[in-house]
Structure formats: C-alpha cells, structure tokens
Image (spheres, rainbow, N blue to C red):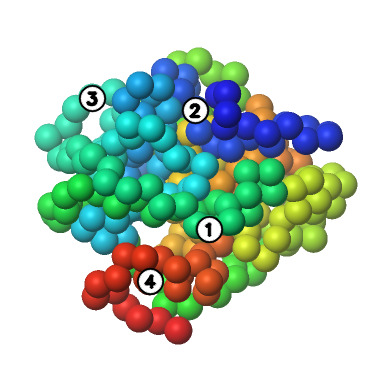
C-alpha cells in the first residue's frame, strides 16, 4: 500500500486504497443487486492496480477522495463485478484530477477530489448521476447511513468476491471518535468529517472503498476517507468520511459549472 498510509504515534492510519489483487469488499455488509447503485464509479490504476470508489455527479465528473490520485487511472461506470467485463460497463479516461486546495495527508483534512472525464458518460439504467445535497446538514449521532464499495471484506482475507457491496453504519459523535478509546485526536476528527461505524463493530468501510459516497437518509453526505490500519470493523476504529460542507459544495459547483442546482 506504499504511499497510501501514514504512521502516527499510537497506530497506523490507513487511507482506504488497496492494490486490486488483494481482497476487495465492504466489511459486514451484503452484495447489492447488480447495477442497483448506478451512481457508483470504480477507479483503478492501469499500472499499479490500485482501486477506489467514486460517485458520478455529472456526465463527465466524478467525486472521490483526494488520496485516490492515481497515475494513468481509469474510471469504470456501470460496474458490479471487479473482475468481469460486463456489457453495462463504460470505461472512461481521466482528463483532469483536481484535489481540493490544501488537502493534508497528515491531518487527513480536505480529502476530496474531482475527476473530469475525457468523454461524457452515457446515462441509462446502469449509469446515473447522484445529486449533490441542497444543504450541508451535519448528520446527528445515531443517524443511519449506507456506504458501498469494492473494498476488503475482512482485514486478513486474501480472496475476493469482487462484487459491489453495501453496509449500514451509524454516525458517531465526534467527541467519542476523538476520545482515547478511539482516535485520541490523532488525527483530529473535525467538523469537516463524519465518523460512522457500529456500536458492536463488524460493520465498516475498508481498504479499497475510499472515495465512495456516504449516503444518509437517501442524501449523499460524505466521501469515504480513512480508518485504522488492519482494524476495519473494530469497535475502536470506526470509518471516517469527508463531510460535504458548504465550502466543499461551493467549490464543486464552481469547478464543474453547468446546470447543477445552485444551492446556498
């Protein structure tokens, strides 16, 4: 995983990107019906085979995490299987990778990026746009959310099912996420982030799920960002998501332009 993780004083915080040959899927979730999440984008490198998730927000724009920056990456829309080439799939070259200004790898702050595709996607039943939220509501602790991806299903699992999976998780109060039993403010879970997992553990996003959308009450509220290394699904290691704040939403709309809802 090389450049995609950072050492801290008490534990390793891992940005959720993995080589494509390793285990891939959500922790504790279920396989979704094929092509039932048509907004999901699969991002993978041609040479290093790393993978990330993303969300199609306009015909030629995908929203993902800043640490998902890849050389020679491609975007696959309409995918369900990680290994099989499906007739629904559309493979797109990336024209530009635009990370949010001041993205901090060490603080995990501003982990958000836009990918401009060279050609517009063909919208159909398997490929659709997910709307950006009209507000930057901060999901309250206890809110039920969903996250999907092609990331690991188990910390030590080496065999991949290779299909898109989804899991229900619950928003956790930032004060709890920052306490000594969890992240111990290393890094600090800020108001630009959402902490979410399960009180009993066993439900989480994991390596390879980065960049995928966090959906709460049928609204996209965040982007999968990071967690503790080799502790996916652990009670003391809930996943952390970049929250779609007002500043991020304004930046997105300004960058991609067009006929998106103005908001704010």
Discs 3, 4 touching: Cβ within 8 Å: no
Can you say which quadrant of the picture contains the C terminus? Answer: bottom left
In the rendered structure, find residue 227 and report the number of the disc placed on it. none
C-alpha gap between disc 3 and disc 4 = 36 Å
Which class describes the residues within 10 Å of circle 1: few (<14), some (14-19), or many (20+)? Answer: few
Q: Nearer the viewer, residue 127 or 185?
A: 185
In the rendered structure, find residue 254 and report the number of the disc placed on it. 4
Q: Which residue is mark 1?
A: 101
In the rendered structure, find residue 18 and report the number of the disc placed on it. 2
Secondary structure under tag 3 reads: loop
Q: Mark 1 or mark 3: name the one nearer the start of the chain.
A: 3
User: Residue placed at 20% from the left, 37% from the top?
Assistant: 91
Q: Is residue 36 above or below residue 83?
A: below
User: Residue placed at 70% from the left, 61% from the top?
Assistant: 190
Query: Would you say residue 73 is visible in this rendering?
Result: yes
Q: Mark 2 or mark 3: name the one nearer the start of the chain.
A: 2
Q: Mark 4 or mark 1: name the one nearer the start of the chain.
A: 1
Q: Nearer the viewer, mark 1 or mark 3?
A: 1
Residue 141 is left or right of residue 93, and the answer is right
Residue 82 is left or right of residue 100, and the answer is left
Q: Mark 1 or mark 2: name the one nearer the start of the chain.
A: 2
Residue 161 picture location, percent across and down: 39, 24
C-alpha gap between disc 4 and disc 1 = 13 Å
Residue 138 picture location, percent across and down: 59, 71
């Amino acid at each position: 995983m090389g450049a995609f993780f950072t050492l801290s004083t008490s534990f390793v915080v891992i940005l959720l990107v993995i080589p494509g040959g390793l285990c891939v899927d959500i922790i504790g979730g279920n396989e979704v019906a094929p092509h039932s999440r048509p907004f999901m984008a699969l991002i993978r490198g041609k040479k290093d085979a790393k993978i990330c998730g993303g969300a199609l927000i306009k015909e030629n724009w995908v929203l993902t995490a800043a640490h998902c920056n890849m050389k020679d990456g491609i975007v696959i829309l309409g995918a369900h299987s990680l290994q099989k080439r499906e007739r629904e799939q559309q493979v797109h070259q990336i024209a530009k990778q635009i990370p949010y200004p001041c993205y901090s790898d060490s603080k995990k702050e501003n982990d958000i990026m836009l990918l401009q595709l060279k050609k517009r996607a063909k919208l159909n039943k398997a490929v659709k746009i997910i709307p950006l939220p009209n507000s930057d509501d901060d999901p309250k602790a206890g809110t039920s959310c969903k996250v999907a991806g092609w990331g690991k299903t188990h910390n030590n699992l080496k065999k991949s099912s290779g299909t898109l999976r989804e899991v229900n998780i619950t928003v956790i109060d930032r004060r709890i996420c920052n306490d000594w039993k969890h992240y111990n403010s290393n890094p600090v879970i800020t108001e630009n982030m959402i902490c979410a997992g399960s009180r009993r553990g066993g439900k989480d996003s994991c390596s390879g799920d980065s960049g995928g959308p966090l959906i709460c009450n049928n609204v996209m509220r965040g982007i999968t960002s990071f967690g503790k290394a080799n502790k996916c699904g652990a009670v003391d290691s809930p996943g952390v998501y970049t929250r779609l704040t007002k500043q991020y939403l304004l930046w997105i709309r300004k960058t991609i332009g067009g006929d998106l809802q103005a908001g704010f």
